Image (cartoon, grey):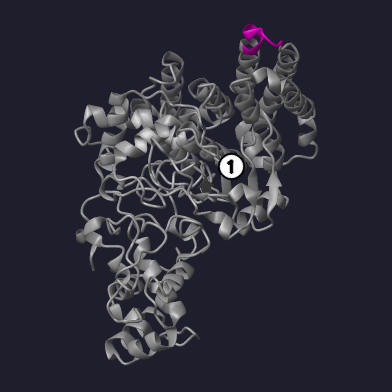
Amino acid sequence: MKWIIWPVFTLLAIFSAWGFKQTPADTGVDNTITIFREDAARFAAASREMETAMQAITPGKPASIEHAKAALKKCRLAYKHIEYFLDYFFFSSSMVYNRPAKTEIDEPYMEYQSPAGLQQMAVLLFDKNPYAHKQALLDQANLVSSSATDLPALLYQFKATDKDIMESLRIELVRLYASGITGYDAPELKSGIAETAQSMRTIQAVLQPWLSTSSPETQAVTRYLGQCISYLELHTDFDHFNRMEFLTTCALPLQESVGNLIHHLQLDQHTRSALNYDAKNLFSKDALRASAFPGGTDTGALLVKLGWQLFYDKALSGNGLRNCATCHQPDKYFSDGLRTSLATDEKNHVRRNAPSLYYAAFQYAQFWDGRANTLSKQIQTVITNPEEMNGYPDAIIVRLNDDSAYRQSFADAFPGDSIPAISMTHLSSAIAAYIFTLSPQTSAFDAYLAGDKKAMTPAQVNGFNLFMGKGQCATCHFAPLFNGLTPPLYQMTEFENLGMPGNGSLRRPQPDKDAGRFEYFPIAFYQRAFKTPTVRNAAMTTPYMHNGAFGSLEEVMDFYNAGGGNGLGMKDPYQTLTATKLGLSTSEMKDIIAFLKALSDQPATTYNY
């Protein structure tokens, strides 16, 4: 983690007061509060022990560092018992303890959040010279410890409902599957499996008031909870943890059974997140709500069909020779196979690689630098860009109005709209609606998760486990879409500086002159930062990166395994990717590539209208 976009509605949700009201019918609230009090006290005690361990760090004594790491891990394990509660009811307070270890920028207010808390301490302890950071470690430990002591004060006049409790647990399960077992919070400590087990224990305790009664719904939750906890406690090796087996045999069934229990108890509530609570699990095709993303509410059949027609219409370009499919070709998985696309003059090239449009709609920022916050804005920008389509809005509207079929299609797609039927606003909305349909999830991986155990090879399954664990791929490419949507709420889009060489060379890397998001927001921390794209269909969309500098997945894996640009010897002070080498073997990297191939959807031509 890394730099993120915080949409306006998310900021309002975070910084405004959420009101919680307890009713006499609520049976789980008192139990939850009791559990939180007890766990908060344990966390406070663990944080004091950690502070003492940091104080004991002595230069030249590696044992003092190992003791400090052990104390940090113990503190993190204690924190995981209260994380679900703090993140749901007191989000701003939770950031004191587990804030990402990189500077974050809250947009649009452009306020900085400096690294702080347990994640930052892990980074400092695993530095090449941790002794030099003793004072910083002490400062962080004191911040955590003093704040933890005051946790009970949060409960003053606290009120909640059973529906609130249940929603917090729904979200926690997603956090565990998409972040916990990946080691997202502290990849250096490799404590993600143990932390997930602690969280599961707390979920079990919080659900006891409901699980004490017998019904098919409670029996299923009890069974799968027990299986999850047993699996996590029996398989503790982070690098070799079988995430696929864990997810398919007990974790995802638990998520489904919890959803069934909540519905059975009539405790459904949706106050936040882009999650679809009616989906079976995190990897269901409908796990994320299209309506949660800009433009996702307008995806009617007539609108989508119109968008499909416009996508392939060369009348949108200035010379009548190009359309959206020129650079986003269906037979190439909506990319064009070029390092950077040809410009309108058919001689020069545009600055950046044309990424696949698959799953592009499920982001809160468009373009590599995120300068458009909606697909509609992105589409209009491309149409009018002199190097891309060089279209003239007035001329486009005249051409479309001259076509009686288009006049009827626009009228049908936008009935009763006060805006003239054929407009750039409507045109871009229609194309955006079509792009929203480009999220098929028809890959071998999706078939495997749906129950077809023959859909993936053993190498691909192992590659998934490595992708989600030792390879740290899933700490930036988050499940289920494997893009920069950050779990568990999926309401933020990440930007990363990988230290990507401009020349694509791993032996003699040269700095990239593309400043990335910095050109849009001239803030130092955005230097050379780019949006994290999906790796679904990555095997079908070579070349790679914003500049198209890597021609194979093997080069991409070698780059990440080396620690990005800084790991290769470059010196980029704003690189967000850890420069620590991953230590993946050649066979392990081959298996990750095999998994990426298992993320290839069925050929795009089957999705025409």
Q: Secondary structure at mark 1?
A: loop
Q: Is residue 64 magenta?
A: yes
Which residue in the protein does label 1 denote? 574
- In this rendering, the count of numbered labels is 1
Most extreme residue toward the front is 508
- At which x and y percent is residue 383? 40, 74
In the image, 162: left or right of 604? Answer: right
- At which x and y percent is residue 326? 28, 68
Does residue 598 appear anywhere in the picture?
Answer: no
- Give the vertical position of 68 relative to 259 (above or below): above
Point 26% across, 32% down: residue: 460
Asked whether 305 or 534 is in front, the reply is 534
Q: Quadrant of the C terminus?
A: bottom left
Asked whether 99 or 324 is in front, the reply is 324
Mark 1 surroundings within 10 Å by alpha-carbon count, few (fewer than 14), some (14 through 19), many (20 or more): some
- At which x and y percent is residue 65? 64, 13
Q: Which residues are magenta?
A: 58-65
- Give the vertical position of 280 relative to 248 (above or below): below
